[in-house]
Amino acid sequence: MLYGLETVSLRKKQEAELEVAELKMLRFSLGVTRLDRIKNEYIRGTAHVGCLGDKVREARLRWFGHVQRRERVVLGPLVPVKGTLNASAYQDILENFMLPTLSEQFGNDPFLFQHDCTPVHKARSIKTWMSEFGVEDLDRPAQSPDLNLIEHLWDKLERRLRARPSRPTSVSDLTNVLLEEW
């Protein structure tokens, strides 16, 4: 129930609906019905579970702390990819473009790497490669555009592209325009 709620602003009604659902699950797992007239606090205490609203606020603050602690954002080169990006091609980009850029920017200082959690970014071979090279990635939920710098970057590029007087008509034109705007 909490997956991805780090970046969501809940209204009181939505928070109440989540708590009702949570209590239904707790009652079911404890074998208790509402007819038993047992107070919610007792059920939470028996299950050793805190209030869902507090958990959501805590997760949101933890995520905000991640965002606040990042010192700076480093953009490497824009690397055009032909066809569909697979784990092997992504690993090649990481080795030949990402690592040199981060090494140049940070030297031996620690850093957090952020990608947008697409399946290729979470492939087992990529996770293995990242642990072998000591690359720590920012733990964040997928589909969180509010705090996702990459999504903001793509949005900015798209706006610049739309603002141009003439739009690209081929893949090579698009690649050249994006490289110019980068």
Image (cartoon, helix red, strand yellow):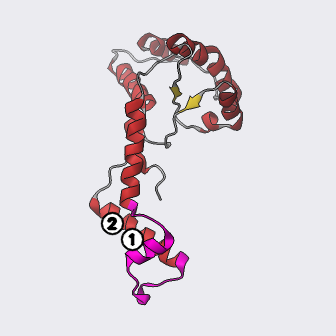
Residue at 41% of width from left, 18% of height from top? 167
Residue 42 location, quadrant: bottom left
Q: Is residue 18 above or below residue 161?
A: below
**Residue situated furthest left in the rendering:** 12
**Residue situated furthest bottom in the rendering:** 35
Question: As drawn, is 129 to the left or to the right of 19?
Answer: right
Quadrant in which the C terminus appears: top left
Question: As drawn, is 67 to the left or to the right of 31?
Answer: left
Q: Is residue 26 above or below residue 76?
A: below
Q: Element type at marker 2?
A: helix
Q: Is residue 76 above or below residue 111?
A: above
- Residue range of the region highlighted in magenta in the rendering: 29-52
Residue bearing the label numbered 1:
20
Residue 153 location, quadrant: top left
Q: Element type at marker 1?
A: helix
Residue at 43% of width from left, 22% of height from top? 73
Residue 34 lies in magenta, yes or no? yes
Q: Position of residue 124 (x, y in %)?
A: 70, 37
Please report contact status of discs 1 and 2: CB closer than 8 Å, yes or no: yes
Q: Amino acid at mark 2?
A: Ala
**How far apart in space, not on screen, are marks 1 and 2 (Cα)?**
6 Å
Q: Position of residue 162 (x, y in %)?
A: 36, 22
Q: Is residue 55 above or below residue 63?
A: below
Q: Amino acid at mark 1?
A: Val
Residue at 46% of width from left, 66% of height from top? 49
Q: Between residue 16 and residue 181, name the one nearer to us.
A: 16
**Is residue 151 something one can see in this rendering?**
yes
Residue 35 lies in magenta, yes or no? yes
